[in-house]
Amino acid sequence: MASSITQAREGTLYLMCGGAEETFNRAKPVLEKLAASVRYVGAAGKAAQVKALVNMVMNINTAGLAEGLGLGAALGLDLTLLREIFSQTGANSRVLQTDGEDMQKRDHSCFFSAAHAAKDSGIALRLAREQGLNLPLATATKKQYDKMVAVGLGELDKSGIAELTFKDRHAAK
């Protein structure tokens, strides 16, 4: 599943399924009642790999947004205006929609914890190592989420990574 609590409540999940294709096809009518989209991605284990990649990219996007907003705040920019500009440019992302205002207002009510972001970033990095790949952005992002856990912010939402980048916030001290 690549969705949030809100989508689960609304029945608009995005499901990625792996396993025997004939089994998927038999289960698909039931799955379609739970989700807005159901995708077959391959053999058993492939959906877990795709989920790890989804979360890796989401975590990188979240960290990047926190840095952009943190720098904007340090420059004295209007963050509401900055978020609107981001939304109309190449800086746009789903994370901007879900986490931008929360980062600005320091509302880190947990939908996907920083501790889970650290764990999932580690899963993706393990997959990368198995393939002989170096992923510097994913590595740096995992270090940030690991730092959140180390300083006691691991139960905040992943948007709490902004606490590491905004001046005069918790871990930025």
Image (cartoon, rainbow, N blue to C red):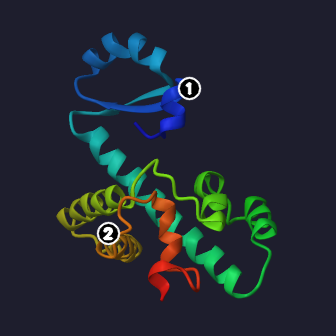
Please state the horizontal and vertical placement of residue 133, each as a whole percent of the image.
Answer: 27, 70
Against 79, residue 40 (above or below) is above
Residue under the point 59% across and 65% down? 106
42, 145: nearer the viewer = 145
**Left or right side of 14 for 65:** right
Residues at circles 1 and 2 in contact by the CB criterion of under 8 Å? no
**Secondary element type, mark 1:** helix
Residue under the point 21% across and 63% down? 126
* Quarter location, residue 99: bottom right
Please state the horizontal and vertical placement of residue 146, each as a whole percent of the image.
Answer: 31, 72
Q: Which mark is residue 149?
A: 2
Against 96, residue 26 (above or below) is above
Against 44, residue 77 (above or below) is below
Please state the horizontal and vertical placement of residue 69, each as a whole percent of the image.
Answer: 65, 74
**Left or right side of 139 for 14:** right
**Earlier residue among tags 1 and 2:** 1
Dot 2 amino acid type = Val
**Left or right side of 86 for 69:** left
The residue carrying mark 1 is: 10
18, 172: nearer the viewer = 172
Please rate how many residues cluster around mark 1, counting C-alpha atoms within 10 Å: few if below 14, some from 14 to 19, many from 20.
Answer: few
Against 94, residue 38 (above or below) is above
